[in-house]
Image (cartoon, helix red, strand yellow):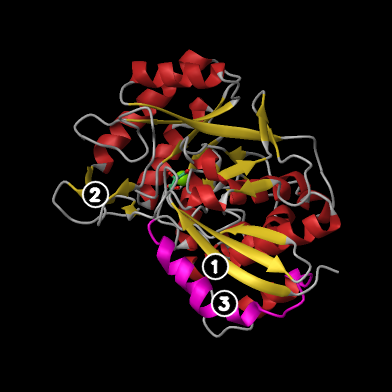
Amino acid sequence: MSGQIEKVEVLVCSPGRNYVSVKITSSDGVVGWGDATLNGRELAVAAYIRDHLASTLIGRPADRIEDTWQYLYRGAYWRRGPVTMTAIGAIDIALWDLNAKALGVPVHRLLGGATRNRILAYTHATGWDLPALIDSVDATREAGYRAIRAQFGVPGLETVYGVSQSAAYEPAGRGARPAEELWDTHAYLRHAPKVLSALREHVGPDLHLLHDAHHRLDPTQAARLARSLEEVDLFWLEDLIPAENQELLRSVRAATVTPLAIGEVFTSIWDCRILLAERLIDFIRMAVSHGGGISHLRTVLNYAAVHQVKAGPHGPSDISPIAMAASLHLGLASPNVAIQEYMGHPAETAEVFSPGYTFTDGYLHPGDAPGLGVEVDETAAARFEYEGAYLPTARTLDGGVTDW
Ligand code: GCO
Ligand code: MG
């Protein structure tokens, strides 16, 4: 018994970047934490939980995790979408944390236990030109990583999303509105194969290399790029085309054997059902926080497994340490989670969130503390007030808005 849900509170703070967390307290005094951070739309999720969900949860049995998920998703008229699914995800993650703590076990034990000893991690390396990229990849490899995502500048452009101009990389920029960046797909397509081939030449065959195109291509461009990179032997090529139109990936898939990953913007199984059923991708990238929590992502992972699709969950800095911990517990208990993105957080984040997961020798482990194993310092959080921050908008050279 974990008692009843007595309190549902929302904590918005900004230690180095914005985070929204949910704290659920049971009548037995047990606390569970969930992550409700949605980059650039934080306050919408905070209000959804605070104004529309919290009062409906008070008094419900705290140990009915699945029933609460069904109640919030199937029981509501309006379904899906990032705000709704992140809100449901945060409540779900908090309830898994609370119940595991009440039982004194790590969340992965409640999910059936570990299916392997550790989870392969990948992180980002960036450099504007090839020498800078090589330096960044070498340093990252030196730090123990066996899988590295490589992003680079494009001649003729002043900025490229995901390529840091300074040491501290954070794609959301503070301010009242998104920055606007220029994008040129043709210049990128001319440049990318040369850089990635030279990088493979430099690192040799063993290191796993990944690359992210951030949904900027059309299916023909995507097919050409993926085919031209086959010799580079990428671990995956990510987000080639806008993710809404699942059927369009059929032609890309038919044209190439480069492994494809997609899905960090997906929020429910309905966004990827065709991709999984037809095995149009090799890796599904949904995040535990944006994808309806541990309960729903587990459904997605099991459906993916039936179709021999693996997972490599989203893990940039906008996945807070709470969701990162949840992803690792679920990942350890799920046989088809092949790799976890692990980008780390700004230094100040550690003043508020103390996670128990560890990175050793290129692999992650969630730890064995009860629950998710993340401590949250609410007093410290109060020192870091929310400040609006947005991902940039991209425009083509003629000034038109282009895809994310
Ligand atoms: C990734 C990404 C991120 C996202 C960002 C959006 O693969 O990690 O594409 O950089 O764009 O997290 O909020
Ligand atoms: Mg990505």
- Tell me if label 1 and label 3 are in contact, CB under 8 Å: yes
Q: Earlier in the sequence, mark 1 or mark 2?
A: 1
Residue drawn at point x = 78 percent, y = 48 percent: 333
| Amino acid of disc 2 | Ala
Q: CA distance from mark 1 to mark 2?
A: 27 Å
Foreground residue, 81 or 323? 323
What are the residue bounds of the magenta stretch? Answer: 40-65
Q: Earlier in the sequence, mark 1 or mark 3?
A: 3
Q: Which residue is mark 1?
A: 87
Q: Earlier in the sequence, mark 3 or mark 2?
A: 3
Q: Nearer the viewer, mark 1 or mark 3?
A: 3
Which residue corresponds to mark 2?
A: 179
User: Could you tell me how far apart the alpha carbons at marks 3 and 2 are, in whole angstroms?
Assistant: 33 Å
**Residue furthest left in the image:** 398
Decide whether the magenta segment is chiefly helix, strand or loop: helix
Task: Give the CA distance from mark 1 to mark 3.
Answer: 8 Å
3 or 2: mark nearer the eye = 3
The disc placed on residue 237 is none
Disc 3 target residue: 53
Which of the 4 quarters of the picture holds residue 224?
A: top left
Image: 211 above or below 194: below
Q: Position of residue 283 (x, y in %)?
A: 60, 47
